[in-house]
């Protein structure tokens, strides 16, 4: 079995705090929030009215107008972010149109038209559902649409492990390249803003009314968001051969599946995923400089994540910086850990750690360095990216400074 090194050579992101890696990075290092009043639907009668919608996204900037009606918004976000990624990597689709390029994407809600079609079917009958909506509706169409758009002939996978799905997708792509099956992998996650998700988290009292405050003693919950984060993974040999820019190296990952509470992963599950990731990357706990936290801002999730970090990094946990960018861009569901992995690549490249904003009151149960309110300059050689999800799907990715 081959054991090739895998590097990141392209980054693309569509988020509520910025489109493209440069605008995104400027926003999260300056602590700018992308949370505002919901405009997609009427929130009258609800307790919460804020979310992290993307207000300035125009798919025609990336996709021919004639194709847009056949693509759901999640596919539009994924294709647009991938366009930015390939451009960033200095590749045109023509240069990688072969069967050694894979597509691995994660999602939580899939395509929005699925929920819309069910609603229309119930209210107006089956005949009222258009063919276009049917073509848009299935989640597996998201990576297929991306592959079709770029004329890619390799494998394409949709991994629906909810909020941890981005890390899962990156892990799959990493394995395919490491073992020599592929030379390139377009990996990440995407989710469009969902009324169904908003109402669901509202109903279980998991959302904050105004702002997201991870690790703060008085945190009140998460903020639903949307977005897409896409990374181009490449074998080191391929990257070196074409003189590609290298942001970071993917060193390893760890997954665990455990029983769960509806809004809180189990400590043992998180601990197991972190330890597996460290082992896979062949690093010690003292080697980790930064953790991009799952950090949703709910009471139970933040407390449990911090407890797991303190248990794994016992004796050195206060030397590890731990921040949550969800305080700024909300929770973009299946895109969350992908965008956070992209963030880790920029952190190890630039040696700047984005802050956890809205932090006001320290919580003794979250006794960590959460990088409160202002970015921190710090040399980061190794970053750990945490992603947890309903179903007990826990994922941790190790991102390493390339050398």
Image (tube, grey):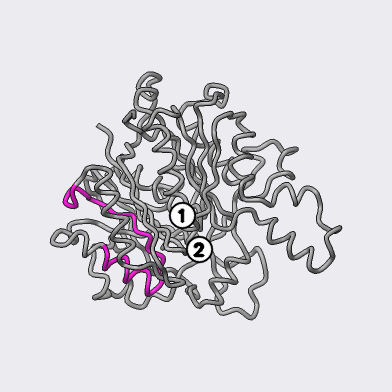
Of tags 1 and 2, the one toward the viewer is 1
Image quarter of the C terminus: top left
Residue 94, image quadrant? top right
Q: Which region shows up in magenta?
A: 284-308
Q: Measured from the top left, where is residue 47 in percent x and y?
A: 56, 79
Which is more toward the observer, 167 or 150? 167
Say which residue appears at 44% left-offset and 61% top-offset.
389
The residue singled out by tag 2 in the image is: 35
Q: Measured from the top left, where is residue 32 in percent x and y?
A: 43, 58
Say which residue appears at 48% left-offset and 61% top-offset.
331
Q: State whether residue 214 is above or below residue 13.
A: below
Label 2 element class: loop
Q: Residues within 10 Å of mark 2 (few under 14, many from 20)?
A: many
Which is more toward the observer, 1 or 269? 1
- Please indicate, yes or no, whether residue 359 appears anywhere in the rendered image: no
Q: Measured from the top left, where is residue 175 in percent x and y?
A: 39, 37
Q: Is residue 338 magenta?
A: no
- Please indicate, yes or no, whether residue 202 appears anywhere in the rendered image: yes
Residue 316, image quadrant? bottom left
Query: Which of the two discs, 1 and 2, labels the residue nearer the N terminus?
Result: 2
Which is more toward the observer, 372 or 92? 92
Q: State whether residue 78 is above or below residue 395.
A: above
Relative to 268, is 123 on the left or the right? right
């Amino acid at each position: 079995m081959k054991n090739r090194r895998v590097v990141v050579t392209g980054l693309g992101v569509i988020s509520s705090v910025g489109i493209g890696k440069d605008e995104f990075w400027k926003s999260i290092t300056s602590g700018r929030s992308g949370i505002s009043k919901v405009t997609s639907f009427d929130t009258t009668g609800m307790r919460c009215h804020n979310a992290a919608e993307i207000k300035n996204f125009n798919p025609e900037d990336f996709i021919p107008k004639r194709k847009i009606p056949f693509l759901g918004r999640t596919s539009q976000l994924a294709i647009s972010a991938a366009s930015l990624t390939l451009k960033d990597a200095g590749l045109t689709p023509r240069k990688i149109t072969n069967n050694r390029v894979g597509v691995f994407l994660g999602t939580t809600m899939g395509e929005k038209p699925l929920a819309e079609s069910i609603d229309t079917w119930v209210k107006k009958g089956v005949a009222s559902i258009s063919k276009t909506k049917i073509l848009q509706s299935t989640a597996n169409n998201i990576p297929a649409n991306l592959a079709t758009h770029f004329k890619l002939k390799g494998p394409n996978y949709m991994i629906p492990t909810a909020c941890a799905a981005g890390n899962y997708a990156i892990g799959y792509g990493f394995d395919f390249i490491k073992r020599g099956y592929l030379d390139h992998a377009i990996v990440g996650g995407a989710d469009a803003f969902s009324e169904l998700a908003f109402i669901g988290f509202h109903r279980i009292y998991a959302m904050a009314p105004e702002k997201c405050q991870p690790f703060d003693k008085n945190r009140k919950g998460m903020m639903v968001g949307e977005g897409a984060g896409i990374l181009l993974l490449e074998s080191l040999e391929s990257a070196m051969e074409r003189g590609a820019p290298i942001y970071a190296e993917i060193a390893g990952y760890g997954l665990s599946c455990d029983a769960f509470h509806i809004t809180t992963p189990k400590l043992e599950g998180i601990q197991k995923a972190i330890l597996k990731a460290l082992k896979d990357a062949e690093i010690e706990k003292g080697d980790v400089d930064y953790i991009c936290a799952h950090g949703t801002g709910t009471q139970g999730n933040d407390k449990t994540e911090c407890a797991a970090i303190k248990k794994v990094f016992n004796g050195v946990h206060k030397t590890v910086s731990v921040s949550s960018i969800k305080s700024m861009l909300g929770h973009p569901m299946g895109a969350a850990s992908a965008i956070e992995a992209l963030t880790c690549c920029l952190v190890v490249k630039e040696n700047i750690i984005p802050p956890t904003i809205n932090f006001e009151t320290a919580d003794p149960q979250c006794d960590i360095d959460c990088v409160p309110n202002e970015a921190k300059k710090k040399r980061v050689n190794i970053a750990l990216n945490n992603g947890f999800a309903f179903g007990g799907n826990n994922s941790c990715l190790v991102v390493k400074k390339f050398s």
